[in-house]
Image (tube, rainbow, N blue to C red):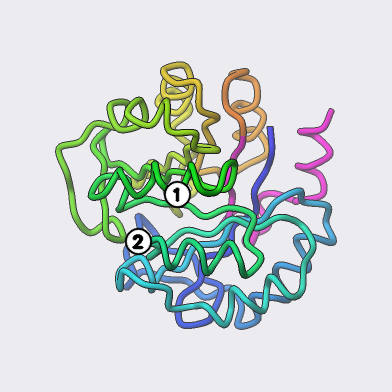
Amino acid sequence: MILYPAIDLKDGQCVRLVHGEMDRATVFGDDPAAQAAAFEAAGCEWLHLVDLNGAFAGAPVNAAAVEAILARVRVPVQLGGGIRDMAAIEMWLAGGLARVILGTVAVEDPALVRAAARAFPGRVAVGIDARAGRVATRGWAEETDVMVTDLARSFEDAGVAAIIYTDILRDGAMAGPNIEATAALARAVTIPVIASGGVASLADLIALRDTGVIAGAISGRALYDGAIDLRQALFALAG
């Protein structure tokens, strides 16, 4: 199982939100590229970036911070937040991102996801963010009646690289991930599923890995708070 250290970008800074609420942001650093380099030095295989402002604006906002990270590290980087048209997808992938994450458009314009996955095999992931099993969009601000598993299954034949499943009520709360729901989703589809939201300890990571069906896990706050030591976690997951 791959561990993806998370760098959430708001106004050019590294932050973490609680339950996705922008007014509940904790700033962890003002040099995202330095943070990315530190994660890489610890041995991570991937980095996970979120343009929080972009998720609300519907267009890239923290491009300068993302570009600085891409210039600083060699590990592959994936980015979500505000990527809602083919021009933005093409721009980011040409600019050095390994993978883009499409969330809101997966609900509002699934044809775009399919077209992007065809055009860029292995480089398009779907982000599914949910409260109580129902998908939320536009920076988690809008609720839908779409069920997580239904949305995931609708992309089974699209060629997407991964599904990143976030339980919003767990995100940033250090309350532990929703292992049961994430594993159930992973068993319901053939697309690799990456868990996001609530990872608070090494034990959480081990529990996700031990399901045997979850391909990856994203952790942010626990790494910044020191609840998880990245080197130790990477070593444990490799064992």
Q: Earlier in the sequence, mark 2 or mark 1?
A: 2
Callout 1 secondary element: helix
- Nearest to the observer: residue 7 or residue 106: 106
Q: The C terminus appears in which quarter of the rendering?
A: top right
Residue 84's disc is 2
Q: Residue 38's spot in the image, x, y percent?
A: 78, 66
Q: Secondary structure under badge 2?
A: loop
- Residue 237 lies in magenta, yes or no? yes
Which of discs 2 and 1 lies nearer the camera? The answer is 1
How far is mark 2 from mark 1, CA to CA? 11 Å
Q: Residue type at mark 1?
A: Ala
Residue 116 - label:
1
159 w.r.t. 102: above or below: above
**Relative to 227, 106 lies left or right:** left
> Would you say 88 lies left or right of 63 here?
left
Residue placed at 40% from the left, 61% from the top?
Answer: 86
Q: Which residues are magenta?
A: 216-239
Q: Against 234, is 151 above or below?
A: above
Residue at 42 percent across and 46 percent down: it is 127
Q: Position of residue 101 (x, y in %)?
A: 47, 52
For the point 75% across and 51% down, the residue is 229
Residue 80 picture location, percent across and down:
47, 58
- Residue type of the residue flagged with mark 2: Arg
For the N terminus, give its image quadrant. Answer: top right
Q: Quadrant of residue 97?
A: bottom right
In percent of width and height, residue 3 lies at 67, 43
| Front residue (pair 168, 53) | 53
